[in-house]
Structures are given as C-alpha cells and as structure tokens.
Image (cartoon, rainbow, N blue to C red):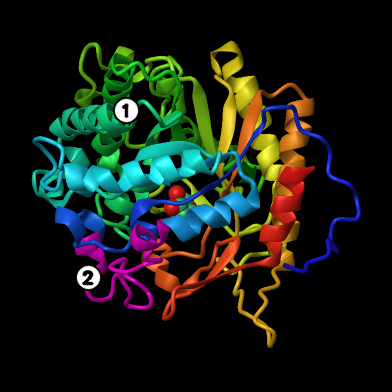
Amino acid sequence: MSWEGELTTVPLPDFPAGFRWGVSTSAYQIEGATGADGRGPSIWDTFAHEPGRIVDGSTGDEACDHYHRYAEDTALMAGLGVSAYRFSVAWPRVQPGGAGPADPDGLDFYDRLVDGLLDAGIDPVATLYHWDLPQPLEDAGGWLNRDTAARFAEYADLTAARLGDRVKLWITLNEPFIHMTLGYGIGTHAPGRMLLFDSFPVAHHQLLGHGLAVAALRARSISEVAIANNYSPVRLVGDTDADRAAARAYDALHNRLFTDPLLGRGYPDAPGLDPAVVRDGDLDVVAAPIDVLGVNYYNPTGIRAPEEGSPLPFEMVPLDGYPRTAFDWPVAPDGLRELLGQLHDRYGDALPPIQVTESGCAYDDAPDADGRVHDPERIAYLDGHVRAVHEAIGAGVPVTGYFVWSLLDNWEWAEGFTKRFGLVHVDYPTQRRTPKSSYAWFRDLIRR
Ligand code: FCB
C-alpha cells in the first residue's frame, strides 16, 4: 500500500514496552450468518427486523460476513501488526435458547478464530456480552429478570471451558450503561423498551451477572478478567447551583453507577436507583477483583440544569468549539486525558490497570477514483487520542492498552450501515475489504 505519512508533523511519543495495541469489533456488528450452525435468535435479530427501528432498514443478517471471512480479516490484523484483537462471542451461538448445554458447532467458530489469531501472533481478547441477548431470555424478562445474571454466569463457564486455555483477556460485559439506557431506558436499541429510570434493575442485574461470571471464569483458572464501560466526562454548561447539581447527577449515572460498585464503593446516589433490587451479599459479588478496567471513550457530554417539568434531572447540550464526526460527536481528545485522570483520582489504589477498549470515529469514507480510501480525519482523531493516553500515562495513570474501534466498517446498531468506523473500508454488496490510509498510519505507529 502506498501511503506516505502526511499528517503527523509532531513525532508520536514512545509507549511503554508491552503496551497492548489492538482493534475491537463485536459479533452482531460483523459476523452475519445469523442462521448458521444452529445459532438462535438474539434481541438484535428481533429488533432489527421490526420496521422503523434501523435508519436504513438494514439488519445484521449478513453484516460483514465475518463468520465466513474471518481468515481474511485475521490476515488484515496480522498486516496491521496488532498485538491483540477484541471480538465478542455471540451468546446465541453458544446457547441458542439462552440456557442448557453448549452447542459445540457455535463454539467451533470461535475455536477456529482463536487458533487463527494465535497462529498470527495476536492475543485473543473475548467479550462475552456485546448486547446480543438470546431472545428466549428477553421473553423471560431480559435483564429486568434477576435470573438472567445466573444464566450469564453459566454461559461464561461454558465458553471458558472451551476457549479458556487460549483466550488471554476476558471481558464480561460491554458498556452496561449504554445497554441499559438505550435498550431499556429510551428504546432506541434492542430490546426497545422505554422504562426511563425504571430500568435500574437492568444495571444491577448486569453487574450481578458480571460478578457471577468473574467467579465462573476464576473457577476455570482465567487470570485476566475485565469489564468494558463507556465513560463520558461531563462538561458543565452554565454556572448556577442547579447546573452543577445536574452535572453531578449525570456524572453519577454515566460514569459512576457501574464503576463505584465494581470497585467496592457500592452504588452512588444516582437518579432512578432502587435499593430494593439489591439483595444482601450482592455488592460483594459485584466487587470481585478484576485485573483490567476497560474504558470505551468517544466524547464528552455537555450538561446543564433541566427546564421546569423535565422528566430528567439534567439536560444534555451540544458542545461548541469542537470538530465533529459523521455521528455529530465532538472530537475531544482532551476529554480522554481528563477522563483517565478522573478515574485515577477518583478510585486511587482501587483502580486496576486501564485498557482503552474502544476509541474511534465515523466518517463518510469512500474509495477515490483509484480505489484508495483516504481518511485523514480518522488519522487526526486517533493521533490526538493516542497522545492523550500518553499524557495520562506520563501523569501516572496506569494505562496498558489501546484498541481502535473498529477493524472494519460494520453494522452500527440503529444507524445500520450508515456509519463507517473502520480502519478497513467494507463495500457491503461485494464484501470487498480495502484498508484505509488510517490502517497504514496505525500499522506504522505500532511498528515503531
Ligand atoms: C460503542 C459500542 C460499539 C460501537 C461504538 C461506535 O458504544 O460498544 O459497539 O457501536 O460505540
């Protein structure tokens, strides 16, 4: 590939030896083959097939066809030189009905993937739950039902029994905050429920499931366990006491609701919190020690006091003065540095090493007349965020890895195929993969 570094005039700093450079994906967003080898339906199959749910009317039925093209995708990662690949295991492939014995055919796929990664010198990093709950479990109440936590631990055990000898880092849940708020709070994600603050049981049952899964993984001698949370540092818009109270409420909900109890602090005082669902002993289960805290960061959030009569204790406001991605998200690398510092200040010695498990941006990338995909905005985005991580390390925050979201353009949930996050462009009708210039940039960064 002919790409000459043209953007980065300031040389990138050196990172500590052993720093983990990786790329992330998730099962429903890339695999396709939703009916293959006995896979059962997930809440995302159901949701995506409901008219009006996905902006372009698409589904993940085919997505990037990674299920059949994983060898080509592994070769792309080998070319990139990443030391780790974060993928997710589809629960409905392992337990098509959400309970009972493992389906060996479903696990065979991950077995082949993991072996291929190891052959290519790439550490497999498996996320157990990236939002694709087996539909039968949703029919029984989904994450509102406490029993789903126990089912999740059982699934974690079955998966670790098969892959635990080779998968290095295990991530229990992806972004339980986003799953709760978009999936059960406002219904723009599967399962499409609109419970607003009555969705708190979904927070607690996911955390309980995480804690029970950690125990199941430890029983299988897994030594590296994590969770991947979404964080967004709050930017106060306004300076009244009411604005400050709104900012505190939002921060508690987005940044602390899942992390305080994980790190042994119990629940913060957050809107909607219902202590009745928290049983004796639960908080000890939730606070089982983890080895890595996964941090997914995209942007900060502007917050001010709500209007009279608002159902929310805060109002979200667009932040001025930043470039924006195709998702209209502000590009704010300083937010990542601030966030990493905040986590360090907030949790001190209780904070395990952090790995940035998702960082990336969507732009309307398209091939030029020569078929090359040039994405200077993504290079600028990643350059800024990598530097932010380096500065945080310099300030004493223990950060040991950085994963770009995402390896490939893929099916972006409610946005369907309209948002491209990949280092590699995917032409969906032909499934042709074309590395973008950001791929070459990231390869060169890792190589140094
Ligand atoms: C995160 C999700 C990931 C992807 C990125 C853009 O919230 O974990 O699957 O959708 O956003």
Work out whether residue 321 can be spotted: no
Q: What kind of element bears circle 2?
A: loop
Per the image, the residue denoted by label 1 is 210
Name the residue rendered at 77%, 25% in the picture: 395
Name the residue rendered at 43%, 63% in the picture: 412
Please tell me whether residue 2 is drawn above or below residue 263 in the rendered image. Answer: below
Toward which corner of the image does residue 329 lie, by quadrant?
Answer: bottom right
Toward which corner of the image does residue 327 lie, by quadrant?
Answer: bottom right
Residue 63: give x, y in percent of width and height.
37, 67
The amino acid marked with disc number 2 is: His
Residue 219: give x, y in percent of width and height.
28, 15
Q: In this view, does 338 lie to the left or right of 163?
A: right
Foreground: 91 or 209? 91
Residue 189: give x, y in percent of width and height.
32, 58
Specify whether residue 159 is painted magenta: no
Task: State the extent of the magenta-drawn residues as a range.
Answer: 45-70
The amino acid marked with disc number 1 is: His
Per the image, the residue denoted by label 2 is 49
Residue 444: give x, y in percent of width and height.
76, 51
Foreground: 204 or 32? 32
